[in-house]
Amino acid sequence: MELHEHALPLTRGQVDIWLSQETAGSRTDWQVGWFVPIRGLVDPDVLDRGIRQVVVEAEALRVNFCEVDGQVFQKAIDDPSLELARHDLRHSQNPVHDAYRLALAIQRTPLWPGPLYKFVLYQTRSDEFHLFICSHHIVLDGFGTVLITKRIAEVYSALISGKPVPAAAFGSLRDLVDYESDYEESGEYLEDRAYWCENLPAENASGYQLPQVANRPDSYVASTPIQFDPAVVNRVDEFCEVVGVRRASVITAACALLVREWCAGGSEVALDFPVSRRVGAQSKTFPAMVSGFVSLSLRALPSSTVAAFCEHVETQIGDALRHQRFPVHVLENNSGPRGTGQGAARVAVNFIPSVTVPPFGNAPASIVYTSFGRVNHFGLYFVKDGDQLFLVTAGAGRPFSDFDVSDLAQRLQRLLLAMVEDPQAWLSSVEVVDEVEGARLDVLG
């Protein structure tokens, strides 16, 4: 691509991904994939039209990149190429399994240098389809995947019913670049920087006792989603009403206690906490890469009560979210961006935006992620779909990559039930691991 007058610089988040990809040497680590299971009849031709329209509307998605004199630029493609590949798997012995197998092959095929998106439709039954979407994280984050999916459903439903298509509300590529550059030149940026200079985790927090292994080729593939028992979720919600905290704070507190048992950092626990960085109405219209992460520093004192610890986590999350736009990694790792293998190895606790999407015509639909992109160590992803809560994991970081996702889900649910049983119980009385594992950890550390 030649440099054009409409070419724009990359945002800081995009530059981080660009540099990570260039140094790591992999063209697929940063690819994000998700299925949209559609339980009903779908007209593939109309869906093709709908997807084409949405790609044209999503300017920040349909970009190409070029490097000129050491600086990287991006420009929206005016006439984007798009093909909705179609596969009829109805005669397969296990059509859904085959759809996932084929999607994984796509996931492992580089999209770079572009187009940085791909759409495939699998028909798994006469009245069931699985739409697979794969994109590069440099143009789309988790929030953006939901925006894109909802808009495709909205456009398809209008087209199939013969009604006018509602106007798109996507922000432009220029709006995105201005949104980021205006922040970096603002007093808010300096205030956020000052906050994080004072609140980064200690270097020795959450040092893992088990030897780590190199990332495997499949270490970024998302696990099978495991649903939490609705009764457990209800108990947690009741606890939240009594204590006055949010569900995410209680779940994060449970994750911190689990991490504390497997690290040598004592009562200090450090987590990576991915954030949307979308703090205004305009930013929530970008089907683009905006997200980042902050470092969550928690103190799980044995003498603290469960309620007090959850309140502490709530406060820490609230403070972090107020300063979420700052690129924390520039303070933690001056030698390079996170994701290059040089950053601290921490568990990430990620609350994915609600994946509830409108129906495609009369056919209900949802989102199931197959990859969240590159994972620095290990990620615990909590996915909300209506009243249902799911756990998904990804990453090669030990010890948690040694556990099956169903095992981790059971551990977290047992821990949550123990925590909400008595808000005034000491943390020291909450059993996180059994006696056998406790003895093993004593030997290790």
Image (cartoon, grey):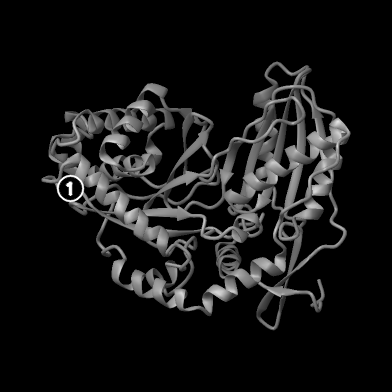
Can residue 359 be seen here? The reply is: yes
Callout 1 secondary element: loop
Q: How many marks can you see? A: 1
Can residue 395 be seen here? The reply is: no
Residue 345, compared with residue 242, is above or below; it is below
Residue matched to label 1: 445
Q: Residue at x 35, y 75 (%)?
A: 194
Q: Residue at x 84, y 56 (%)?
A: 80
Q: Residue at x 36, y 42 (%)?
A: 246
Quick check: 39 left or right of 298? Answer: right
x%, y% of residue 17? 58, 63
Which of the 4 quarters of the picture holds residue 284? Answer: bottom right
Quadrant, the N terminus = bottom right
Instruction: In the displayed orientation, state which residue is furthest to the left.
Output: 303
Quick check: 132 left or right of 391? Answer: right
Q: Which of these two is toward me, 184 or 273?
A: 184
x%, y% of residue 155? 79, 41
Quick check: 60 left or right of 353? Answer: right
Q: Amino acid at mark 1?
A: Gly
Q: Which of these two is toward me, 337 or 269?
A: 269
Q: Residue at x 73, y 37 (%)?
A: 153
Residue 240, compared with residue 278, is above or below; it is above
Residue 67, compared with residue 154, is above or below; it is below
x%, y% of residue 37? 67, 29
Quick check: 411 left or right of 282? Answer: left
Q: Which of these two is toward me, 180 or 412?
A: 180
Local crowd at mark 1 within 10 Å, few (<14), some, or many (≥20)? few
Which of the 4 quarters of the picture holds residue 188? Answer: bottom left
Which of the 4 quarters of the picture holds residue 418? Answer: top left
